[in-house]
Amino acid sequence: MPLTATKTLGEQAYSTMRRMIVVGELPAGQWLRKRAMARKLRMSATPVVEAIRRLEHEGLVQTDPPWGPRVRIFTVQEIFELASMRVVLEGLVARCATSRTTTEQIEHLREIAIQVDKADNSFTKPPLGALANEDINFHLQLAEEAGLPIVRQELERLQILNATCRAWLTPAIRCTVTHVDIIAAIASGDPDRAEAVMRQHIQENIDAYMPSLRERFGEGPVAEDGHVGGGTFPRERM
């Protein structure tokens, strides 16, 4: 197989598996058997192995000897730290968006915001993929329109927080600050207001789900009985 084709398949495997992890299709603790994933993605095992290595470097996959790689299981403390990072980054996005988005972009984002608010139960209730993507796409597109590609990339990784919390918390968390409110604040042209509204939106989620997570898991792994997937999974033969 030509090198360019291998690289293309590796990128495809990486982006697909990354999306599946972020939206919860591959949940925390899910073992990543390279041959099974290769069959699922309809490609050879080589690009899957490449994708797993990249995802491990990115912090979304962990390798547990001797069993192999699986989707990373975050601790409650790690979730708190990552969520706090998201507050800061999302606030920066909203602040920059006040001066970097056009009227047309604002109106398009408002349309998306309306749809996300209608799907307000997407945080914890199935179907997981489609509804979760509505909220994810809103925040990522806002970062893109604000001209912050590096921040957008980091926010995409941090969206795994939603997938992790959706798996454990019901009913859905409902914020008093909606996505439409965020767009209204950005449209006002006041960067301080936009940042404050966005920060409140994200912080409300943290304030709602952190006590529940701590009550159930302490500061340890967010997983059933302290683990997901168990330790009896046989290593895949080479």
Image (cartoon, rainbow, N blue to C red):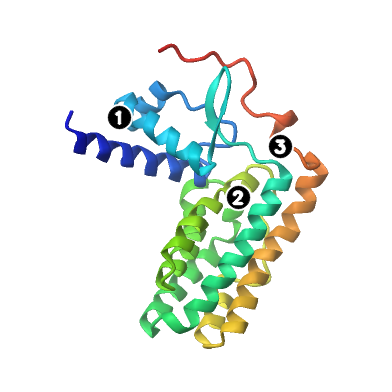
Residue position for label 1: 42
Q: Residue at x 59, y 71 (%)?
A: 91
Closest to the observer: 88 or 57?
57
Q: Pinpoint residue 169: horizontal percent, then vertical percent.
A: 69, 47
Distance, label 3 to label 2, CA atoms, is 13 Å
Residue position for label 3: 221
Amino acid carrying label 2: it is Leu
**Marks 2 & 1, CB-CB < 8 Å contact:** no
Residue 193 against residue 32 in the figure, above or below: below
Q: Quadrant of residue 104?
A: bottom left
Instruction: Quadrant for the N terminus, please.
Output: top left
Q: Quadrant of residue 221?
A: top right
Residue 236 against residue 46 in the figure, above or below: above
Q: Is disc 3 placed on a helix, strand or loop?
A: loop
Q: Residue at x 67, y 59 (%)?
A: 84
Residue position for label 2: 161
Q: Residue at x 65, y 72 (%)?
A: 177
Distance, label 2 to label 1, CA atoms, is 28 Å
Q: Is disc 1 placed on a helix, strand or loop?
A: loop
Q: Is residue 171 visible?
A: no
Mark sitting earlier along the chain (3/1): 1
Instruction: Quadrant for the C terminus, please.
Output: top left
Please identify the residue farthest to the left as the structure is shown.
2
User: Label 2 crowding class (10 Å Cα cut-off): few <14, some 14-19, many 20+?
Assistant: some
Mark sitting earlier along the chain (3/2): 2
Q: Is residue 137 left or right of residue 202?
A: left
User: Label 3 crowding class (10 Å Cα cut-off): few <14, some 14-19, many 20+?
Assistant: many
Q: Pinpoint residue 100: horizontal percent, then vertical percent.
A: 42, 80
Q: Is disc 2 placed on a helix, strand or loop?
A: helix
Closest to the observer: 59 or 133?
59
Q: Is residue 233 left or right of residue 77?
A: left
